[in-house]
Amino acid sequence: MDELSDADLERYARHVILDEIGEEGQIALLEAKVCVVGAGGLGSPVLLYLAAAGVGTIGLVDFDRVDRTNLQRQIAHTDAAAGTPKAESAAARARAINPAIRIEPHDVKLTPETVERVLTPYDLVVDGTDNFTIRLLLNDACYLMKKPLVSASVVRFEGQLSTYRAFEEGPCYRCLFDAEPTEGLVPRCDTAGILGPVAGVMGTLQATEVLKQITGLGSGMVGKLMLFDALDYSMQIIRTRKNPDCPLCGATPAITRVGG
Ligand SMILES: [Zn+2]
């Protein structure tokens, strides 16, 4: 793509007017291929903002069905969609916002057997899941496939955000959170609760970070971990480091293939 069409210039006028984005940045967004994993509390705002921003190809992975107990925060879905596949429901919303881009729903469970096939067409992956096993799987697959991973998590009134590009620099997710936590020790939204808009705050930051990774705008979240607490609105950014003994990205890796 050499230049934006008249329709693109109309739709993305408020991006193009930003010197830091311009026509070049918008073309980079239109040419980007991003895979959003999870069409839930984080995935909803991520997907809607990426679609609105004109990320040209967006994959959306979720094998679950829309559940009314989740509509308090999963704003990509409507009440009428309850019981239908989440990937399709959220894809329909994103297409309604921006019919000019490509939305690819994947109603599939990510496993060591499926993850490479699903992620292969994309250049960047967004982790919006709430499951530690899937987080590790995505981390390993993205590292081995050399794809940046923009990761966020939320529970109760708190959220975290980081970007992992350990194949180039910085730590991977395993460097920071390696040991599989004992079942029940990690609070999850379905058991510990979540204040709905906290997922919106973190998902919106995650979408911002995706646009920054694609356009090179400002400084990104590689080698940093953001900690947000809605109770006092505190936001902290701490430096993170590679673990030299990391089983994935360390000096003598034990994990050399996805699921291995
Ligand atoms: Zn690592």
Image (tube, helix red, strand yellow):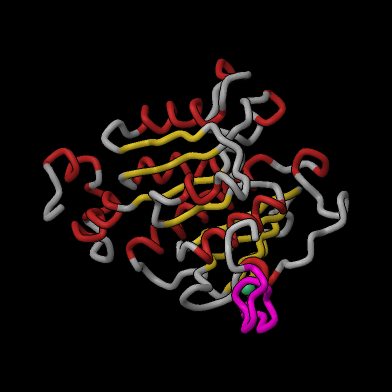
Q: 204 or 60, which lies in front? A: 60
**Overall secondary structure of the magenta section:** loop
Answer with left or right where residue 202 lies relative to residue 208: right
Residue 75 locus on image (x, y percent): 56, 33
**Residue 241 seen in render:** no
Compared with 126, 62 (above or below) is: above
**Residue 147 seen in render:** yes
Q: 183 or 24, which lies in front? A: 183
Q: Quadrant of ligand 1?
A: bottom right
Compared with 140, 120 (above or below) is: above
Answer with left or right where residue 221 lies relative to residue 187: left
Answer with left or right where residue 195 lies relative to residue 87: right
Compared with 10, 159 (above or below) is: below
Which residue does the image show at 63% across and 36% down from the upper left? 73
On whether residue 211 falls in the magenta region, the answer is: no
Picture quadrant where residue 158 is located? bottom right
Looking at the rendering, the stretch of residues picked out in magenta corresponds to: 237-255
Q: 106 or 10, which lies in front? A: 106
Residue 189 locus on image (x, y percent): 75, 43
Q: Quadrant of the C terminus?
A: bottom right
Picture quadrant where residue 248 is located? bottom right
On whether residue 254 falls in the magenta region, the answer is: yes
Which residue does the image show at 67% across and 68% down from the upper left? 174
Residue 196 locus on image (x, y percent): 66, 40
